[in-house]
Image (cartoon, rainbow, N blue to C red):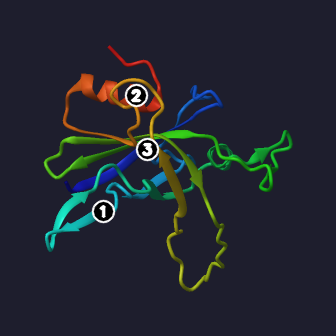
Amino acid sequence: MTLVHFPRMTIQPFDGTGTPKGDPIIIQGDPNKGGTITAEISGLASTALKVAASDIEYWISQEGVGEVSVDFTLIDMPAAEEAIILGQKTVDSGITYVGNDTNPPYCAVLLESKNLAGDSAYLGFFRGKFAKDKETLNTQDPADKKAPDGDSYTFTAAGSPDEGDQKGEYVAKYIGSDADAISTLKAQVLKATPKP
């Protein structure tokens, strides 16, 4: 499956009980609200375990997934929303602190794309945590102006604890145009009420 376009991602932070906390964070290229550049998903296959018998590879187990994660490149994500998903402390003065009590909340993530045929494609991650390991500052060379680079984030996924088809699953994927299927996927991932 080849995916083209990456116009929008939605992040829903959760509280300690797994209930949505605050409005979803939508990154879709709105001015001063951040834009999506890349998402690279890894860990979708587990490591094969082989058993030899009778001088052949007699049995192979490859059930489940590996360490499912998504490496994102985003640009211009608002500082307040970044602090929320990274679990950083922001006080009334507007200062954000990063330190011993930094603890990212669990979040769900929904990515929107299209395949080569133009069908809508949705990839949802039920639960996981964001990390941003570094900040980079670059001088601006007046003689060689360049477009700004995006920031790198890693989302480490976990299986869904919720009952239903998604229990224990890491990723929900749908390609097509069925409104009910899309609504169900969004409701499962973002824990939102499905639209009729």
Is label 3 or label 1 in front?
1
Q: Which residue lies furthest to the front in this view?
A: 54
Marks 1 and 2 close (CB-CB < 8 Å): no
N-terminal label among 1 and 2 = 1
Kind of residue at disc 2: Gln
At x 66%, y 67%, the residue is 135
Q: How many marks?
A: 3
Name the residue beneath numbered marker 1: 49
Kind of residue at disc 3: Met
* Image quadrant in which the N terminus is located: bottom left
Marks 3 and 2 close (CB-CB < 8 Å): no
Name the residue beneath numbered marker 3: 9
- Which image quadrant is residue 141 in? bottom right
Depicted 36 relative to depicted 148: above or below: above
Percent x, y of residue 9:
43, 44
At x 44%, y 56%, the residue is 67
Q: Give how far apart the Cα atoms at labels 3 and 2 are.
A: 16 Å
Q: Which of 103 and 75 is in front in this view?
A: 103
Depicted 12 relative to depicted 33: above or below: above
Percent x, y of residue 113:
30, 47
- Which image quadrant is residue 169 in? top left
N-terminal label among 3 and 1 = 3
Q: Give how far apart the Cα atoms at labels 3 and 1 are.
A: 35 Å
At x 29%, y 62%, the residue is 48
Identify the disc placed on residue 188. Answer: 2
N-terminal label among 3 and 2 = 3
> In screen coordinates, is 123 left or right of 133?
left
